[in-house]
Amino acid sequence: MAKSDPKSSQSQISWVQRRLEKIWYKGGWGASVLLPLEGLYRLLAKADQSSSKNKQIPHPLPIIVVGNISVGGTGKTPLVIYLAEQLQQAGYRPAIITRGYAGDLQEWPVMVSPESDPSVCGDEPVLMAQRSGVPVIAGPDRNADVTFLLENTDCNIVISDDGLQHYKLKRDIEIAVIDGARGLGNGHCLPAGPLREPAARLASCDFVIVNEVMANADISMQLQVSELSHLNSGNQQPLSAWKGQTVHAVTGIGNPSRFFDTLRSEGLDVIEHYFPDHHPFSLSDIEFDDRFLVVMTEKDAVKCHSFATDKHWCVPVTAKVSKAFIKDLLKRLGEMEFEHNKP
């Protein structure tokens, strides 16, 4: 098996982050040392939640919030794209609002297009604009994002990406996503554990979806991969055709191990290169002095198109969710009375 590249995997991820993740997901005495800070975090988070709820603004269309209660990647972006597709098929006119994390705009919100610069408005908004085909608005103030949508589009339902803790946004349906492999870690809140909110918060969510390899949970989601897409030409090849090949796997996502494991499950020999989430890639990050091809996630690829070479490929993923979920979701939406919500 190929070995990890120490340049990227060791120098790009801080020792502190690696140590914390070891405590959160593998146990150890470190969590007990951080318990006083966890208590302070929970007090401050509860106070902020109470204050934010008092500032909620009602909107004349249904708001679906997709998020998680833990830090790191759980598969929210593919689920948001899936929801947009399913709602369109049901006759709705959905739009997506998102934080635009890592974007450097001075004035928000902004309408994101498939051609937008991810360094300006964030990588995930650009990916969602490319894949969903619906209006995507990026900005830190979710209420301002909704107002912008109402003034500039004909949408009649809004999907808020990663907004579970944005309590100033009045929501009608909450969907929490959990990583089936890592679960809720040690069950503690930050910094003693990976949770943004206590595990009991899940009981108040309308749906809890588990991102897992095999469907076992009540509502299960699988991220399906079947092909590779060439960054320069857009040509596609079946992932199965690469079985037995050694590749450089480069990623800057919240849970890189899932990406590496997916490639290995398809028979690829992986040289790991992992960077911090939302890393601003440059050519030097994805260029290696050997003959092996380079594979990355779609989220990383949107930041690399301008300087990619013939050696660079990405792996599109598609969410598959339990059939009963969308049926139940559409039923709930149909029972809601809003000015603009009817398909």
Image (cartoon, helix red, strand yellow):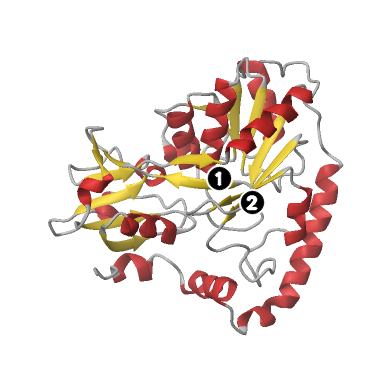
Residue 168 in view of the camera = yes
- Position of residue 234 relative to residue 271, above or below, is above
Along the horizontal axis of the image, is 294 left or right of 113? left
The C terminus sits in image quarter: top right
Of 148 and 180, nearer the camera is 180
Residue at position x 61%, y 33% from top? 97
Picture coordinates of residue 276, whole percent (x, y): 44, 59
> Which residue corresponds to mark 2?
68
Q: Point out the residue furthest to the bottom here.
A: 29
- Position of residue 1 relative to residue 260, above or below, is below
SS for tag 1? helix
- Position of residue 299 relative to residue 159, above or below, is below
SS for tag 2? loop
Residue at position x 52%, y 75% from top? 19
Are there few (<14), some (14-19), or many (20+) residues within 10 Å of tag 1?
many
Inspect the image, locate mark 2, and give the three-letter code of the amino acid beneath it: Asn
Residue at position x 80%, y 53% from top? 48
Give the mark nearer the N terminus: 2 vs 1. Answer: 2
Q: Quarter-wise, where is residue 216 in the image?
A: bottom right
Picture coordinates of residue 117, whole percent (x, y): 41, 34
**Image mark for residue 76:** 1
Along the horizontal axis of the image, is 287 left or right of 89? left
Residue at position x 33%, y 42% from top? 226
Picture coordinates of residue 327, whole percent (x, y): 65, 31
Inspect the image, locate mark 1, and give the three-letter code of the amino acid beneath it: Lys
Q: Point out the residue furthest to the left here.
A: 291
The N terminus sits in image quarter: bottom left
- Position of residue 145 relative to residue 256, above or below, is above
CB within 8 Å, label 2 to label 1: yes
Mark pair 2, 1: CA separation = 8 Å
